[in-house]
Amino acid sequence: MTDDTPLRRQLAELERRIAAQGCYLTELPAKESDPIRYELLNSKLVEAVTSAHEVARLVSASPMTRELGEVIFGLYTPEGDAVVLSRGLLIHVHTMSRMIKWMIRNGYEDSPGFAHGDYYFNNDPYIGGAHCPDQMIVTPITYEGRLVGWAGGLTHTPETGSSEPGGFVPFARSRFEEGLFLPCVKIAENDEIKRDLEIMVERSVRSPIYWLTDNRAKITGVRMIREQVGELIGEFGLEYFTRASREYIEDTYRAARSRVRTVLAPGRYREISWRGSVMPGEERLLHGPVEVTVRRDGHLEIDFTGMSPAGRHPFQGTLPTLEGLVMNVIIQHLFYDLKHNEGVLMATRLKVPEGSAGDPPSFIYPTALWGVTYSAGLAAGQALSRAYYARGYREEVHATSALSTGYTAGGTDHYGRPFGAHNFEFAAAGLFATGVADGLDTAGVEFNPEGEMGDAEIWEQIMPPVYLAREIHIDGGGFGRYRGGNGVFSLYMVSNSDDLEIGSFGSAPIFSAPGLMGGYPAGALYMWVGGRTNLRELIESGAALPAGEGENPERPAFVDAIGADWELYPGANRLARPVRDHDVFTAMSGDGGGFGDPIERDPAAVARDLANGVGTRWAAEHVYGVAVGEDGEVDEEATRGLRARIRRARLERALPADEYRARVRGELLEDRLPAPTGRMYRDVLRFSPEWRRHFLGFWGLPDDWEPQVAEAAGSASEPVRMSTRNTDPLEAGRV
């Protein structure tokens, strides 16, 4: 392999030119000379990647791709810059670009080479992607022997061969527990898949059919793009195609800066987010601060200084992940009607501390759940909301999206085959509230706005558990003048499998999606597991089976309806462990944050939520201050009294800002922080001198101050246990 290659020199020259001139191109002759022809080619290119997306969904056997749409395709320049993108997994709009540039910089042009009919596979998140299940394939596009671009496709695969089934490993300490990684491996030549690599997959993962059919789906899609691009070059000419492809990037860059100048108020906007590591005995919160600077020239500077350092846990992400999250947020909430390509990212300047949980120091650090990078990326979206609000664009203001969680399963399925997978119905989480409307229930997730929950019958085909209930999570979304969207809450029963493990992934047992401007956050994630149940007896006796959680999450209706040994997992992290037939468990998709003061909510909206079964009387009275009669009508006089009482109670416990600040300073000096919080601040203060100066200065603390954290006596990862088992099925609810 030579030290330098033409393509590497080409990439270096492009980056040097962009840095020198401050833009991708200085002129747009294709657009200016014939704007109709310019837009026509762009439309045809978008059509090519969109067609690839739709066809690929039907090729794969994976429910993630086929049912939920966890897929995206793109067209890239020879140097790897995105030109056009399909709909779908928007978080990965930049990760395939990262992969192409990594191969160029590492001499792949010389060896193994870029030839027509070659296909390269990658699922290494330090090269591109978020974690092992994110699997991408790119192929070079050549015309008359010249490399003119790349076609790429990415899917999320439900099984990776990880130490626990399904690829999401909430207790992984290193990359080597997360599954089979193939970093930029050539998996096909001359449009033929290499059989030896397929055998490796077949003998390395529990359910290879999903991985392998996803590969065929991606190869089908990128080949379609390759062929259609060749036809378009024949129609428009190679020189015009090359020029216009680059102009689209500069065009978006200019449009993005214009949008920023028009709709966002210049200034600095700070937000904070948290996730948590639940490694037994080492529980700690993870710090995800962000400062967004809206510059008058239309650039966004996004600074993650103060992020927790990387650690031996899977709740961190890679730099490609954080870049993708930022692009995902600004495309959806700021640049939604522009051409989606590399120009979007050019309008932003990221500062991510090296060695942090957003840019770990070594690829051995696990990233299966990339939690703090996700929350920090969403916090950047809330900062944009404040900049929108300052300009008066209230309809663009939004709280935070849901934190995802789901269950994993592995063993022998109901067809007698080895299997492993995770249920991805969390793609239909509750969306954030906005400054003018409630969040949508069971609607989507930030990383894939077009995600679906999938049909229950499809999940029952591929995984042994069956649904006892699938409902909208009652009171799940954050309370507010406009409430956050409620997610999905499902109750499952294990059926027809003598060899099955069930696990779950989530986060720390803290609130999940922050609210905005007085709105409440969504509640913490959790999971119930019931073993040694009396469900067989209930079914045989014809008794009514539980149909949901009911109005009391602390004591769900199914706990009283089913006799079982129960475990409650705050945070929803459960190591995959064996279960028996007729055992039950729950999963939830996550809920959105609320906006505005709850006691400013329209009482009619509170009554409507009660009537629709998505709110509770407790929340109506104690949070919203709304009195609703048994007839469903609002008692206006009683409502005024409730809200007046809530206001008085707030005033009684309120403190002036100076007094509050002094009280917190005293608590810090007395080391009264809970242990997980103390570990978080200790780690960040040691890791980031810049953030340390800011924190100590704000609270007026001595230069040598640091939390003194005692080691944990127990583990927050342990479940809460109780039993409702009784020999009489009808008496099951009595403890």
Image (cartoon, helix red, strand yellow):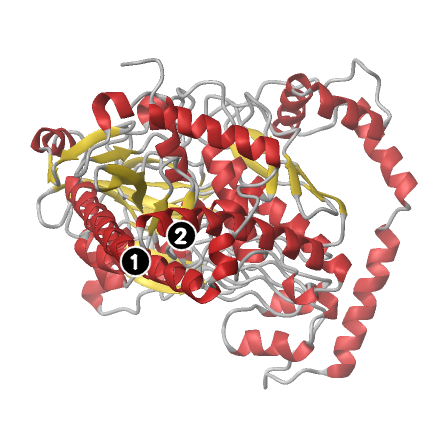
Residue under circle 2?
A: 84
Decide: is 681 above or below 436: above
The three-letter amino acid code for the residue at tag 1 is Ala
Residue 645 relative to residue 581: left or right: right
Q: Which mark is residue 583?
A: none
Residue 568 relative to residue 596: left or right: left
The three-letter amino acid code for the residue at tag 2 is Val
Mark 2 burial class by Cα count in 10 Å: few <14, some 14-19, many 20+: many
What residue is drawn where x is 31% and y is 33%?
A: 123
Residue 575 seen: yes
The answer to which of 67 and 651 lies nearer the viewer is 67
Decide: is 702 above or below 287: above
**Residues at circles 1 and 2 in contact by the CB criterion of under 8 Å:** yes
Q: How many numbered badges does the structure rendering display?
A: 2
Q: Quadrant of residue 176?
A: top left
What residue is drawn where x is 32% and y is 59%?
A: 50
Q: Position of residue 54 (x, y in %)?
A: 27, 60
What residue is drawn where x is 47% and y is 28%?
A: 13
Q: Position of residue 72 (x, y in %)?
A: 34, 51
Quarter that holds the N terminus: top left
Decide: is 556 above or below 107: below
Residue 496 relative to residue 395: left or right: left
The answer to which of 605 and 364 lies nearer the viewer is 364
What's the distance in space between the residues labelled 1 and 2, CA to CA? 9 Å
Residue under circle 1?
A: 48
Q: Position of residue 472 (x, y in %)?
A: 44, 65
Decide: is 271 above or below 550: above
Q: Position of residue 382 (x, y in %)?
A: 64, 50
